[in-house]
Amino acid sequence: MAAWRIFCIGVSANLVLATVLAFGLDAADHAFPPPLENAREISAEVLDAEGQLLRAFATSEGRWRLGTTATDVDPQFVRMLIAYEDQRFWQHRGVDPIALARAAVQFVGNGRIVSGASTLSMQVARLIEPREGRSLTAKFQQLVRALQIERRLGKPEILDLYLTLAPYGGNLEGIRAASLAYFGKEPRRLTVAQSALLVALPQLPERRRPDRNPALAEIARGRVLQRMAVEKVVGEGEAERAGLAPIPSRRLQLPAYAAHLAEAAQRKEPNVKRHQTTLHRSIQQGLETVAKDAAGKLGAKVSVAMVMADVRTGEIVGEVGSADYFDASRSGWIDMTRINRSPGSTLKPFIYGLAFEDGLVSQETIIEDRPSDFFGYRPRNFDMSYQGDVSIRQALQLSLNVPAVRLLDAVGPTRLMVRFRRADVRPVLPPNEAPGLAIGLGGVGITLKDLVQLYAGLANRGRPMQLGDGIQDKPETIEGEPLLEPVAAWNVADILSDVLPPAGAGQRGIAYKTGTSYGYRDAWSVGFDGNYVLGVWVGRPDNGAVPGLTGYGAAAPILFEGFAKSGIAVTPLPPAPAGAVRIAQAQLPVSQRRFSMNASGLLAASTREPAPQIIFPPEGARVELGAKAGGDIMPLALKLQGGRAPFRWLANGKPLPETSRRRVNQWVPDGGGYSTLTVIDSVGRAASVRIFVD
């Protein structure tokens, strides 16, 4: 009985001791946790719309450490890694007793460490808490840390940490950085040879660096392949073929596309590690190649900027801020897509659009291209010559200056600027100056992005389009009045689609316009098809002149090559909207056959009668039309006062069937929505109202 009591007391004491020890170890575990925060800093990444890497930023320590999970890696690599480094990874709890016993026997037999018993968990412990040397003390500390890590993290998380932190030589850490640096690709699809090399490198990363010690790297890869064949992870024949593959001889640069946009994303959200953009890497890569090659041909200090946007969504799909971000001689660090420069003739299409909208002209209306004086402003053509009488179509295609100024004088510079504001674009005027006729020839400042935004509205049938910032923010819809009426926008696009391509470029079915600023400082070209708009700027960031630099000679070839190298298929321009037709010159109403102005630069209409004025329907009216017994829409009565007969009425730019000497007419709308009604009298004076038809 006494013996039993003594036994019970002994058991109780051991239980108490075990409990105290357990609580002590648990307290120690919480008091001295593994420094997992050391593994938290990873490189910030900027991704394209499909999640492809555009650019990465090194960590604060200058290391390339890209966040990686097992789903980012070829499954074959994971199988090879576990088979080579830690066969019982999924079964043990941080320490492999079998491997540990084997290592102990080898140590006793040889008096030194022959092979380690490191599990992947122990290697993660070493990576987050590096220690010099391979002493027993260091191994014991790794073992303890591995047990702690396993208490806190699941196996998939531990594997992800290894894939992110494993050293690969130099400042490369993690399999993604290594795969990009040595093979130029993400590790989602690796060959057997590539997987074997990436398994072997972390053991001795500096000695086995393939770019410095290819022979040692090849030997190490061979050992991995031999082991994989023995373990039947790969076939013997497959291992032999993989052993014949060449070792990469150099280290590649990690992707560095869209440098300016990537830095903008970092500034916007400096604590975010993955920035999603709306760019497409294939488009971006093509545009950057075109810009760099073109700048090299154009000469020293010349840079190139490009913006491509989707006119359906407003998203920027490609953006090049300079020809080469790292070229200091071209001030490559300056993002020229956001700098105000003189747009040259690129705003002319919007002047013509307003003239079409007001019914002042049709495509075949004759206009004079002769020396003119507009209250002291004497515009001249770029080549200092004049064409005489030309059609509106020819004047825009040839980018003649005098006809553009004549039309701007008729529609009004202030009205043109108001239209730009409808598209949320605000060109910069010279200090203390009101909008004048010079804005039609580039007398304002505008950014490339804003110019592309204007042309996106033109390509979008006159509906203003707000472009995004290229980062995560979605483009906002611009509600309200159109930039141009659909018929007017179609007329402009129809004319620009027939402009001759630059020398050496094939016809690609795009509508485009060029521009050259005063003093050969800026060359522009903006073009669009049914889906995309691309803008190009060429010049010196320091605003220096480049003799001979023109939009047609320098920027237009880049535009056409940019469309070609972007990889997108050209989409036809949208069909003509209702009411949009080409009318031969002989079939135009008398008032539209010639656009004439007097010596003062005013529309030639000096008569005793006052100018025509539409009194019904009034400006901004909302008209609800009924239906006849047969279901047809009832006509809308049109009334005017003033003007000289006969009168020609136009609805959305399309002439009504007949001229009339009466001041009352009728119009049957094609459908509901906004419409513009215009009346022109016999001497060319016009009046317009805009209404909404229910």
Image (tube, rainbow, N blue to C red):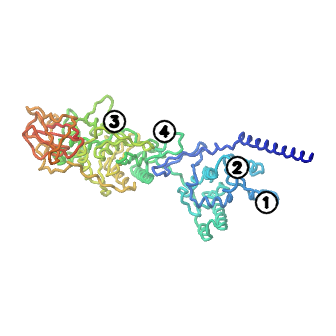
Q: Mark 4 or 2, which is nearer the eye? A: 2
Residue 122 visible in the displayed image: yes
Q: Evaluate whether residue 402 shows in this view.
A: no
Q: x, y percentage for residue 84?
A: 67, 60
The quarter holding residue 568 reads: bottom left
Q: Are marks 2 and 1 in contact (CB under 8 Å)?
A: no
Left or right of 459 on screen, residue 112: right
Crowd around label 3: few <14 · some 14–19 · many ≥20 (10 Å) = some
| Residue name at image x 61 percent, y 69 percent | 235
Q: Which mark is residue 426?
A: 3
Q: Secondary structure at mark 3?
A: loop
Q: Circle 2 sits on which residue? A: 146
Q: Secondary structure at mark 4?
A: helix
Mark in front: 3 vs 4: 4
Mark 1–mark 4 distance (CA, rounded to whole Å): 56 Å
Sequence-wise first label, 4 or 2: 2
Q: Position of residue 71 (x, y in %)?
A: 56, 54
Q: Which residue is mark 4?
A: 268
